[in-house]
Image (tube, grey):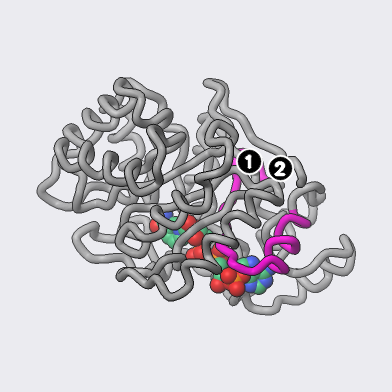
Amino acid sequence: MITIPTKKLKNGFELPVYGLGLWGMGGRREVDDSKDTVEVEAIRAAVDAGVTHIDTAEVYGVGHAEELLGKAIEDYDRSKLILASKVTGANQSYDNVMRSCEGSLKRIGTDYLDLYMLHSFPNPGIDITDTMRAMDELIRQGMIKNIGLSNVTQRRFNVAQSLTENKIVCNQVHYNVQYREVEQRGLLKYAQGNDVMLVAWRPLQKGALPNAPIIAELAEKYNKTPSQIAINWLISQQNVVTIAKTSSVDHLIENLGAIDWVMENEDIERIREDFPNQQFVSDAVPLDYPSDTPPNY
Ligand SMILES: NC(=O)c1ccc[n+]([C@@H]2O[C@H](COP(=O)([O-])OP(=O)(O)OC[C@H]3O[C@@H](n4cnc5c(N)ncnc54)[C@H](OP(=O)(O)O)[C@@H]3O)[C@@H](O)[C@H]2O)c1
């Protein structure tokens, strides 16, 4: 087992630089229980290897990802895990936030979440004031330890922050060597300047990052694989941590080989400049996506 380095905010909130994401485990927009045994084992393998931050959401497999997580960790020390889930934009009225959180806790089989995020800004017709009031109440009742946001612009982040008595600890966003919307929109700089964690989702672009000469060159220089370069590029940057999904032990081991070294600044900037075919709007969940339209995760 390895100890994954962490990043810490001034208020003490801490996340490992690498965590496991569960999107696709237990189904996508429907329940798929055909691979339950393999997926539960994959989660356990990650925890056995040293992964503590596990990211899920009520919509992943319509709750089944959370059930798989609950099954996977039932024999582990809960206090050593950092469990994160999200409430979907449609469920962000005061009462529904409370209900959604209870549902997530029940499916995971825990009495608190370390991090609870708005999966997006609330759907039209739902007042963010009520949403944040509910998030504060969840903290007060001990059901969640920290509040986070996901897929929000800086403007929306500031609105949400102004409506809670708690510090919003993170913005979870689509960010990798190819997808740069968060740089373009100032979110990276904001996170770095304001003691907020940027949690980069889809670090490997679902295993389909294009082959790029700059990545091949740096893979040779650091004696690492292209995936390790892509992950390390993210977490070598201040205030950035990442979550990747893998059900494969080989991929898990490869990805963990990305975390115990730091890329030189000059190389970080070369990838920022030279990576080809950069995208400045997420093709999956653009930051400004209308929250009444289902994102295309
Ligand atoms: N907040 C949001 O709106 C949002 C949206 C999307 C995702 N997320 C979160 O972010 C997590 C990660 O994003 P993601 O799952 O979309 O994308 P990802 O982690 O970039 O890619 C996962 C895919 O890449 C493969 N993979 C993993 N490691 C690999 C490696 N070393 N080499 C080659 N292929 C590899 C996996 O296959 P194997 O299983 O075969 O390894 C899987 O198919 C999600 O699971 C979810 O928790 C959040």
Q: Which one is nearer the viewer's eye here, 152 or 225?
A: 225
- Residue 266 position (above or below residue 169): below
Q: Which one is nearer the viewer's eye here, 212 or 185?
A: 212
**Mark 1 or mark 2, which has the lower sequence index?**
2
- Residue 233 position (above or below residue 118): below
* Quadrant location, ligand no. 1: bottom right
Q: Quadrant of the C terminus?
A: bottom left
Q: Which residues are magenta?
A: 237-258
Badge 2 marks a residue whose secondary structure is: loop
Residue at image coords 48%, 59%: 22
Question: What is the three-letter code of the residue carrying label 2?
Answer: Ile
Badge 1 marks a residue whose secondary structure is: strand
- 10 Å crowding of disc 2: few (<14), some (14-19), many (20+): some
At which x and y percent is residue 182? Answer: 49, 53
- Residue 90 position (above or below residue 250): above
Please name the residue that numbered disc 2 is placed on: 4
Please name the residue that numbered disc 1 is placed on: 16
Residue at image coords 68%, 61%: 252
At which x and y percent is residue 257? Answer: 78, 57
Taking 113 as reference, is 292 left or right?
left
Whether residues under marks 1 and 2 lie with C-beta atoms below 8 angstroms apart, the answer is yes
At which x and y percent is residue 295? Answer: 31, 65
- 10 Å crowding of disc 1: few (<14), some (14-19), many (20+): many
Residue at image coords 28%, 32%: 135
- Residue 232 position (above or below residue 247): above
Taking 92 as reference, is 86 left or right?
right
Question: What is the three-letter code of the residue carrying label 1?
Answer: Pro
Q: Is residue 239 magenta?
A: yes
